[in-house]
Image (cartoon, rainbow, N blue to C red):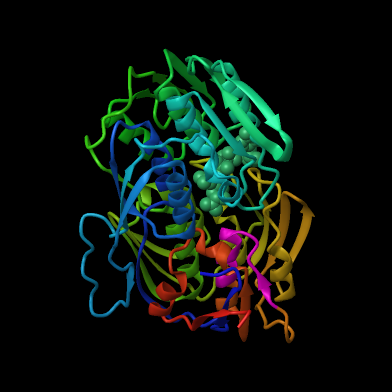
Amino acid sequence: MDKNDEFIIQGLAGEKKLHGAVIINGAKNSALKAMAASILFDGPVILENVPDNSDIQTMISILEKMGAKINVKEKSFTSFPASPEPQRASKNSGGLILEIDATGINSTEIDPELATSMRASIVLTGSLMGRFGKVSFPAPGGCVIGARPIDLFLSGYGKMGATVKEENDCLHKISAIDGLKGAEITFSKISVGATETLMMAAVLAKGKTVLNNCAREPEIANVAEWLNVCGANIKGIGTPTIEVEGTNGKLLSFKESFVTIPDRIEAGSFLILGALCAKKLKIEKCQPKHMNTVVKLLVELGVNIKIEKDSIIVSASDFINSTLPRSIKTLEYPGFPTDLQPPLVVFLTQIKGQFSIRETIFEGRFKYVGDLIKMGANITTINSREIKIKGPTPLHELSENEELTAHDIRAGFALIVAALIGNGKFTINNVHLIDRGYEKIEERLKILGVEIERTDKAR
Ligand code: EPZ
């Protein structure tokens, strides 16, 4: 997994022949937060079903640099051909098992270089502030999908009695000499990261914290429920108002291991891929109830989907037709997820009808659209938050030496789907961004029948 890695993909030119099953990994955006929460504990914690992608590796490095000890145990594989009938995966889908002992953390400085490569690093400020009452960190990086400010975090810490200083190079130093104090915080905007970060900070703060206008993503509940089993007192999990009563000491390790929920975004990505290219694709070990909005939309648009207890079977229809123009917007959970907007747009280029997509979460998430237009898609950009799509349009090969560029994790996956529908051979660069969220994606796709190779551009 190198910055020069590229994917070469042979398009199926509209044929719907992928076949098999894929096991969904644990949710990256849940596991990363549980890793950050390990700092709140009095000893080692065990995290199960952790996906093996590069963001998880980055978080491991950040924690280790601060003094945590991490033991990584290997895992089993995550996809297989449809025949013979796949064996059932055991307790969880077999992700990594991490044992994290953060008791020896002796630094409250989040490594600037690592932090700027991953937005989720900011969540560490919550557990560090809760435990040590101080932290220094750079403006966090991550996917370039919009401005991604951190005002909600900073004003939240201010309300909890901390002082925030910004130094040159955007280095932030936050400190609360006598520790954080409970407070009532009303987020001016719904934010996943701010909800989980301030929730973690409040666990070890003095007194009661009330967080209003919280995000309700299932990944937040996954972490909060585990913290409660280990001694935290968090109420209102999964609702817009979360109340946290601070504990009198760190959380109890070894109470229960954290089991990462299935990645609903990975499952949704494969669902859309299957809706376009699969004779039959079984998406195993997912949590269909976390995907209601996505499934409902695809079913309304005519996709063949069968829901089972923890799997979804999808097969592509030959002709899907939306008679009325449709307007779809991304929203916070339980709305349509922004992370599935790019693959959905690729899907809509293949559907007869007119669609408008409004991106309400991030203002910079249509960068990949230019590549789709180069492939022949009929897409009009209205502004940085809205596009219009008229389909269906076959997607064709680019001219010689032209490549597709993965601008972020999800746009990268969307380009894989676009290349697969397309007629010809396609090169996708910036594959290291796809690796941040999709573990060994080419190996899993090959098993389903995709012709995909990873090459090193520099070689
Ligand atoms: C999380 O990002 C996810 N990342 C993102 O997944 C996901 O797209 C996003 O939630 C929305 O679902 C992780 O969990 C690591 P937000 P996060 O704070 O927490 C604004 C992926 O591909 N905002 O909910 O950073 C912000 O600019 C990634 O896996 C402020 O204005 O998202 C955005 O417009 C990409 N001020 C909105 O809130 C703040 O202080 C929602 O962002 C914080 C956020």
Q: Magenta part of the protein: which range?
A: 403-416
Question: Ligand 1: which quarter?
Answer: top right
Asked whether, in this view, residue 37 is left or right of residue 430, the answer is: left
Residue 2 pos. (x, y %): 55, 70
Look at the image and tell me whether residue 90 can be seen. Answer: yes
Residue 116 pos. (x, y %): 61, 48
Classify the position of the C terminus by image quarter.
bottom right
Callout count: 0
Q: Is residue 392 above or below residue 50?
A: below
Q: Residue at point 29% right, 55% down?
A: 310
Residue 24 or residue 153, whichever sits in front:
153
Q: Is residue 65 above or below residue 428?
A: above
Q: Residue at point 39% right, 29% down?
A: 237
Among the 4 quarters of the image, the one containing residue 397: bottom right
Q: Residue at point 40% right, 72% down?
A: 444
Q: Residue at point 61% right, 66% down?
A: 346
Residue 305 or residue 9, whichever sits in front:
9
Asked whether, in this view, residue 146 is left or right of residue 276, the answer is: right
